Image (spheres, helix red, strand yellow):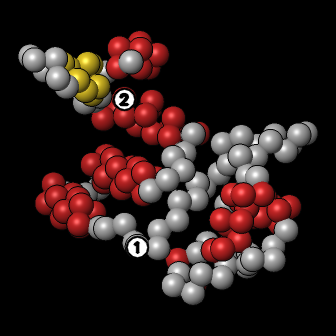
Amino acid sequence: MLYFIKKQLGVGSVNITANNQKADFRIRDRKTIGSIIIPIFEKYPLLTSKYHSYEKFKKAYYILEDTNLSTKEKDNLLLELQSEEMPNNYISIPRRPSTCREKNVNYTINEASAHRVRKLGVMSELPNSSLSPQISHLNINSRLEDIKSAISIY
């Protein structure tokens, strides 16, 4: 499977331990991460708490690529980022639906996932400041069309 991924992406390396117990796929070139890997996860966002990990990874990438920061500033920002924990009430909502067509609204949003979004507006443990203005008005009574509209601009 790892060799297939390597072939499809056209970059990276596959490493297998001497006893064939573990294997991993690595991309060590930061430019490749920025030009190939990040665009893939922007187009096809993770839908679980792994999205939070991806966001931290992406922030780290941009910190490392920022030529206006000194090495010490980068180190401090990366240490701060590393210590960030996922909030207990974290709910993963990708910024843009990955499948949206004007003609035939083909959202990954269906009534079940719309219910998840509806709950955002009524979850008292979520501070209002943590919600995007585009979805903060949604509540348990929001219609599926309203939720789709809000997420399409999110």
In this orientation, does residue 31 appear?
A: yes
| Residue located 35% across and 20% down the image | 2
| Residue located 57% across and 39% down the image | 44
Q: Which mark is residue 80?
A: none
Residue 138 vs 53, above or below: the answer is below
Disc 2 secondary structure class: helix
| Residue located 23% across and 66% down the image | 83
Q: Amino acid at mark 2?
A: Thr
x and y percentages locating residue 90 in the rendered image: 47, 68
Task: Give the side of residue 123 with respect to residue 146, left or right.
Answer: left
Residue 75 vs 29, above or below: the answer is below
Image quarter where the N terminus lies is top left
Which quadrant of the figure has residue 27?
top left
Question: Which of these two is toward me, 9 or 16?
Answer: 16
Disc 1 secondary structure class: loop
x and y percentages locating residue 68 in the rendered image: 29, 55
Instruction: Provide the residue designation for mark 2.
Output: 32
Instruction: Provide the residue designation for mark 1.
Output: 88
Question: CA separation, marks 1 and 2?
Answer: 33 Å
Q: Amino acid at mark 1?
A: Asn
| Residue located 80% across and 42% down the image | 106
x and y percentages locating residue 9 in the rendered image: 44, 20
First in residue order: circle 1 vs circle 2: 2
